[in-house]
Image (tube, rainbow, N blue to C red):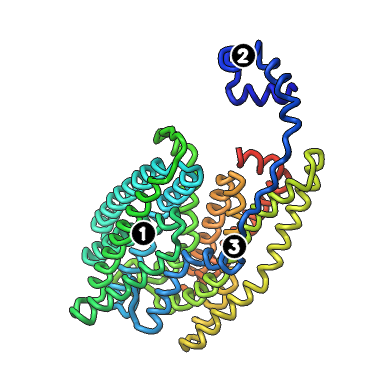
Amino acid sequence: MRDLATRLETEGVTDAVAVAEFGFASTFSMAEAWLPRIQSFQALPAAIEPQRSWWREYWKGISFALPMLASILSIMLLDFSLWGGDLSPEDATATGLGIVCSFLLGGGFVQVVARRGLFLAGTNQFHRCEQSTWCWVRRGVAFTILASLALVAASAYWDWLPSRISLTTAAFCVALSLFWMATGIFHVLDRGMLVTWVTLGGIALVGALRFGLHLPLVNSQLGGILVSACAAFLISARLLRRRCEKPAVAEVPSSFLRDVFFLWPYFSYGILYYLLLFADRLVAWTAHTHASAFAVQFRADYETALNLGLVSFIVEVGWVHCSTVSFYRIATRAQKNFSIGNTGGFEREMIRFYWNRLARFIPVAMAGAIAGLLAAKAGGFLHGSVLTTAACSLAGFPFLVVGLWNVSLLFALSIAQKAAAATAIACLVDLTAGYLLTRIGDYHYAIVGFLLGALVFAFLSGYWTLRAFRRLDYFYFAASA
């Protein structure tokens, strides 16, 4: 009876409400009268949740990486893509820097748009989802433009790069940031495959501008990126507006400072993850440039070797989404199988699940490595330093994928600050090791920094994940509250 009275009070049925609306002397009197009827209710049959097959979950997991695969294949087969391709050394440097800067400047905003949008959509707050999405997109665009102008001014003041290259870098940075933010909204809408179609449409437009109108490749790519970004924004706006027509719950607006308080770990992680992914490139591009006219020099052979690792990454990363979906399903089932007095059994069950999923990743990692080697053989890249760099890249990306799996669990348990901390330490290791090795030896040694950073990322995020799993009953409940 006391339990029922407590539940009534949490629903707002105080003594005054019990008297005024239900005709009972108090909440306890109401609970005493209602308890026999409630105990006579028959339990509702458990709802059977539809489960998608593993290959559908896997396909959804790799959907965000398919544009990367389309770009790599387009460069291999056509010598151009939506970005990159058969460019002069100056244009290749500008494009490469623009790509990296676009991820570093826009990555945090893309992460915030996705995380905030998914939460609001998942709680049926569709109007707030639409408003929050466009608000953070506007902030991201404004920040990227201002930061790009600041970098151009700094380059002119300290004479880092010629004005033409600096402006081209800034143009690619802004255009690609728009593209990442526009396509990031597709993941909020659970339309990941639209990213691939928009990317393919952009590549086709680049080809039409390049070979049909005979425009320079850089201009064609900037046009293709901007048109693709505009198309993605228009499609996203239509889909977001359509969602607002669904029934929604009462929505309470939130303040900017409150959003910053809750979202800063995701924003930080969005920047740090891409820094971890691109730090070795920046180290390699700035090593041994004393004989070059620029402070930064694009290394085509190094980029080719990394692309082979990225092919393996695309094959492997789908496992992360499949495993995360399995975590929610297994945790819900295990909760029902263990009583509240046996939290230790629940935690041991989930720790076993964690190690079993890691064991299942081994054949996936092997398949990714084989895919990368087959791509290398098809492209004729198996020679010299490219082979050594590609081998380290193929060895490092599985650890990056394991780190992403740990990060997805930390996010699921609302411990995003640990994910950001693990990524920050991994970036520091990557930059430090890569810088020292490339200044002592060849620029190809930058890949060792990436390998060490990926190892630290996987093991440190795994350590914090297992620590959380040893108190999973608390963290799982707290994250669900």
Name the residue rendered at 44%, 38% in the picture. Answer: 259
From the viewer's perspective, is the residue at label 1 or at label 3 nearer? 3
Q: Which residue is mark 3?
A: 52
Q: Secondary structure at mark 2?
A: loop
Relative height, residue 311 to residue 324 (above, below) = below
Dot 2 or dot 3, earlier in sequence: 2
From the viewer's perspective, is the residue at label 1 or at label 2 nearer? 2
Name the residue rendered at 61%, 41% in the picture. Answer: 480
Picture quadrant of residue 18: top right
Q: Nearer the viewer, residue 64 or 156?
A: 64
- Is residue 294 in sight in this rendering? yes
Q: Which residue is mark 2?
A: 23
Dot 1 or dot 2, earlier in sequence: 2
Residue 257 in the figure: left or right of residue 6: left
Disc 1 to disc 3: CB gap under 8 Å: no
Relative height, residue 159 to residue 24 (above, below) = below
**Callout 2: few (<14), some (14-19), or many (20+) C-alpha neighbours within 10 Å?**
few
Dot 1 or dot 3, earlier in sequence: 3
Under mark 3, the amino acid is Arg
- Is residue 161 in sight in this rendering? no
Q: Which residue is mark 1?
A: 102
